[in-house]
Amino acid sequence: MRNWKIAGLILCILAAPGFANLITNGSFELGNPSFNVYGFQSLSAPDNFTITGWTVSAGSVDYIGPYWQAAHGQRSLDLAGLYSNGTIYQTFPTTPGTPYQVTFALAGNPDVQPRTTSVQVWVSDGSTVFDSAVFNYTVNGQTRTSMGWVYVSWTFTAQSALTTLGFTGQDTYNDPTWAYSFGPALDDVRVTAIPEPATLALVGLGLIAAGFLRRRR
Ligand SMILES: [Ca+2]
């Protein structure tokens, strides 16, 4: 019976990588910001050193600290930084042909409302954006201490051994003073391989085998 339990645990361990988050610092908690007195820092492209694991590749984003409530941890992003919508991305290993699920927390800078803000999420094989989607979020009544974060998800199928996942602010509000400085808010980005039925079966078998012994003891 001991062998069943060991086999079960091994099956679970073998299958576990299919559920791991492939994104480094998806909650934006790691970095070396110099937050201003309001509790954020505007980053201009190119910037691949302020937020660990991420590159600001176009426009501007705000790295948000105490300025507003994060969805997870203490930090998040405004994808319209100073005067411009921005783009941020990260590259990670993938298996071509495998489907992946992207989930992230979405809200909107509440300083201008009501308005609807938008973010484009996209994936590239290094040279070409091969899939993308736009998510809209309506800001109406939220505050910096009650951001109204919602979790959304999207799936793509990898085309290459490395995939770049990016987020681009697409807010259309052009402020007379601040121009495009009020964008969609982003936090808690996760990417996981969508487990194949065989992987789920392995986990199930593993749990059954591991649990069988416990009941018999
Ligand atoms: Ca966070």
Image: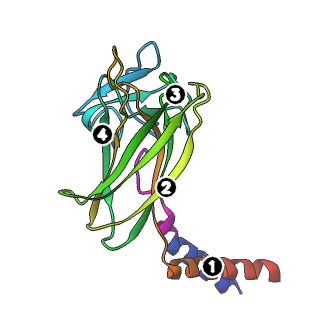
Task: Answer with the quarter of the image where residue 217 lies.
Answer: bottom right
x, y (%) of residue 187? 48, 40
**Which residue is identified by label 4?**
87
**Main SS type for the magenta part?**
loop
Q: Which of 29 and 70 is in front in this view?
A: 70
- Indicate yes or no whether the magenta region holds residue 149: no
- Indicate yes or no whether the magenta region holds residue 21: yes
Task: Answer with the quarter of the image where residue 99 lies.
Answer: bottom left
Q: Where 2 sits versus 155, above or below?
A: below
Q: Distance between the Cα atoms at labels 3 and 4? A: 24 Å
**Which residue is identified by label 3?**
114
Instruction: Single out the mark in the foreground, 3 or 2.
Output: 3
Instruction: Single out the mark in the foreground, 3 or 1.
Output: 3
Question: Which mark is first along the chain, 2 or 3?
Answer: 3
Q: Which of 126 and 183 is in front in this view?
A: 183
**Which residue is identified by label 1?**
204
- Residue drawn at x 22%, y 34% as measured from the top left: 46
Q: Distance between the Cα atoms at labels 1 and 4? A: 40 Å
Question: Which mark is first along the chain, 4 or 3?
Answer: 4
Q: What element carries label 2?
A: strand
Q: Distance between the Cα atoms at labels 2 and 4? A: 19 Å
x, y (%) of residue 55? 28, 40
Q: What element carries label 3?
A: loop
Query: Mark 4 packing: few (<14 Cα in 10 Å), some, or many (20+)?
Result: many
Report the number of numbered marks.
Answer: 4
Question: Which mark is first along the chain, 4 or 1?
Answer: 4
Q: Distance between the Cα atoms at labels 3 and 1? A: 47 Å
